[in-house]
Image (cartoon, rainbow, N blue to C red):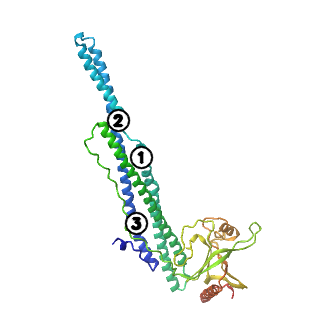
Amino acid sequence: MAASSTEKESCLFLSEWESARHEHHLCRRKHVEKELHRQQLQLQSALASLNSWLAILESRRKLNEVAASAAAQALSELETRWRPLRLELDAEVAGWLLGAEQSYAAKLSGQAKLWAAAAPEGGTSLRQRLQALSEHLASRVVAAIRLWDESHQAAEQAWQSHHERVEEAARAISQERAPPDSWLSEVQYRERARKHVTELGLVEELLRSSAEQLETLEAQRAEYWTSLAESYRSCCDDTSSDVPRLKLGSLEPAATLPPLPDMPTAYGAVLQRVPAAMMTPSGLFGRGSEWREGATLVLTIHGYLHLFLPDPKAKKTTENSPEENVPELVESDVKASVYAPRATKCVFQRRGQELVVDLAEQEPEPATPDASPPAGGGAAGVLRKWWGGKGDEAPLRRIHARVSDAQQFSELETHCHTFVRRGQALRSASGSPTGYAGQG
């Protein structure tokens, strides 16, 4: 029965996976909250019990110390008042009684020393480790859960934005308008959804680690209780009663929770995906242009061509797609984007074995004559993009790339020219200038 509950299902469509991800989050969130609460309550009980055990020993020590001091002081005051008044006839009796009382006061003092040494070694260290784990749960683990919740909200917002963009694209196509790039919004959603799954893994790992630490500390506390109880019985001179064993809590296995299905790897809005090399900017420090390998060209069904180039120095947190064996694309790696139906230049050159794509569209005009150029535009924007510039730089409006596969190059050429001609036809019908330069 448990095996069937943990069997991983599969999702064909991304919308199905998003619904599964949402339900999975609610289920895991409930379990995480329950497990965190269990650990916090157990630590609270452990610390309170340990402190109470040691407090009882300290109370016994203080009571015997106070009693010994009070008995000695009272005996001294009594002797001071009694000695001037008694005769020699009562001297022997007085000596015996006072000696007995002095022995009792010494016994109380000895008992105080026994209770002072009754606490086994390691109690302070155990208390510090329990307190450290409690603070770890209240700070690091709670912060990780908060980040996980925020990533869930970000994924939901990205999905809503993607869904709205898909609907807007459908309306734009029916009205023969330029549709928004719904595929790029899918990339954004996938990136945020993967981050949510990663944050979940971190939360579960933190809770798993803290549960193991708590289990170890509880076993040590049980051993400490056994030693403390024996010391307590010895100080009380009581060996008749049996010492109860300390009960330990148990962890609910996470394997009983339903797993999250794998995210569908197929991009429904992708028409073609081609490995490529990108032409780097020229002129910096006297260096000329050069091809940089590792880029990816993606053409969507709406005519958007994107050039992705990951930063080789950046630490990747996403894994390759298990089915396609290709790296997942992230929004921050978009270096250039061109809407092919609006392209002012569409050139596919064959120079022997070198296959070069040069696709460009007009840069957007500033909103006012005094407005600054778009972020990322011009030479300065290019240099910021290539040499570590961060912020809101827009992708370039020109794609200059090299393709190694001749068949994929030909297919990409056909698709791009089809989109360009479609855009020309729409502009001709509306009376707008084409401004197109192309080469087969």
Is 242 displayed left or right of 253 in the figure?
A: left
State the mark number for residue 68. Answer: none
Amino acid on which disc 3 is placed: Arg
Residue 87 seen: no
Q: Position of residue 392 (x, y in %)?
A: 60, 67
Mark 3 lies on a secondary structure that is helix
State the mark number for residue 126. Answer: 1
Amino acid on which disc 2 is placed: Trp
Is 352 displayed left or right of 158 in the figure?
A: right
- The residue at the far right in this view is 286
Amino acid on which disc 1 is placed: Leu
Q: Which of marks 2 and 3 precedes in the sequence?
A: 3
Q: Residues within 10 Å of mark 3 (few under 14, many from 20)?
A: some
Is 105 displayed left or right of 156 in the figure?
A: left
Numbered disc in front, either 3 or 1: 1
Q: CA distance from mark 2 to mark 1?
A: 20 Å
